[in-house]
Every structure is written in structure tokens, then in C-alpha cells.
Amino acid sequence: MKTSFVLLTLILSAGAGTWYFQEDLPEPCIEDWAKQTQSLFTDASSYFKRFSLPKNQNTTDSEDLLDQKLQELLPTDSMDLKYRPSENVITTTAALDISQSGLLPDMFKKSQSDGTSLSGKVHMDEDDNIIGAEVEVAIPTSM
């Protein structure tokens, strides 16, 4: 019992001494974080600049040549970019009047032609439990 009491006293006094003599660290603030982050990026960029190859005159010339080619592809200020429909373009209302038999079928109108049909009934007992079912599937052979 005495040893446990002495051991507990030593642990508590060591913890109290450590807590009392520790340095008071300042509260972290956003300005310090921003300065440290900026210095990190500055140091990293200077580190990687040491390994980058100096630009050759050849790469600069090829970049200038590529820029010139891309500039030539752009339309000039004097180019007329206005749209003028030709005379043989059908107007929208005229296009709607033309029969549209060549287009996809109208899926919203039910067709009367023969097609696949499905019908059936469910068999139930006195307690309305399902005990069986009949399913009839009609698939036309001349589709």
C-alpha cells in the first residue's frame, strides 16, 4: 500500500511539474499560417528551379512558330461571319407540313398493327392469397 501511494505521488508530482514548467505556446493565427505557406511555396519553387533546364533558342523558335500558326487559323477582322440562309433552305413551318414518313415512328400514337401482347390472370384462394397465375404471350411471326 505504501509503495502504491509513493508511486502515485511521484507520477502526480512529475505531471504537475511538467505542466507547470512547459512553455506557453502562442495561439496559432491565420497570418502565421499564410506566411509559413508562402515561404514553403517560395522554397519549393527555388528548389525546382535549380533542376529546370535553361530554355534553348530552338524551343523559343518552335513556340513562336506554333503561336504564329494558331494565329493564322483565327478569323480576321475583315472576314464576314454573318449567316445568310440560301434560297433552297426549307423554312420550319414548311418542313412541318411535309409528311414525315421517313422519320422515326410516333411513339405516342398507339398503332393498330399486330404486335406482341401480354395478358393473364391471377388465381387466389378464400383468404386472398395468391395460389397461381396464368400468363398468355402472343408474339407475331411476321414482324
Image (cartoon, helix red, strand yellow):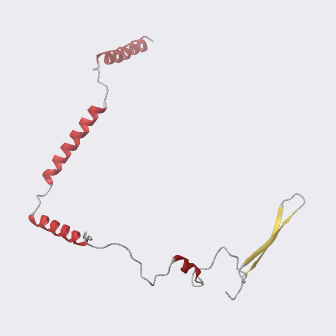
Question: Horizontal placement of 23 versus 57: left or right?
Answer: right
Residue 122, quarter of picture: bottom right
> Hey, which quadrant is residue 85 in on the image?
bottom left
Instruction: Give the quadrant of the N terminus.
Output: top left
Left-right relation of 83 to 35: right
Task: Report whether 119 appears left or right of 107.
Answer: right
Query: Residue 11: percent from the left, percent from the top?
Result: 37, 17
Compared across the picture, whether 100 is left or right of 34 comes to right
Say how many tags the image has: 0
Residue at 43 percent of width and 15 percent of height: 4
Asked if one can make out residue 134 in the rendered structure from this viewpoint, the answer is: no
Query: Could you tell me residue 112's position as x and y percent?
Result: 73, 81
Residue 113 horizontal/vertical position (percent): 72, 83
| 1 versus 75 height, above or below | above
Question: What residue sits 31% from the left and 25% below the top?
Answer: 27
View extreme (top): residue: 2
Name the foreground residue: 16 vs 139: 139
Q: Residue 124 appears in which quarter of the rendering?
A: bottom right
Residue 88 in view of the camera: yes
> Residue 105, percent across and down?
62, 79
Pick whichever, 93 or 17, lies toward us: 93
Residue 102 lies, with reference to residue 75, above or below; the image says: below
User: Residue at horizontal 15%, vertical 51%?
Assistant: 49
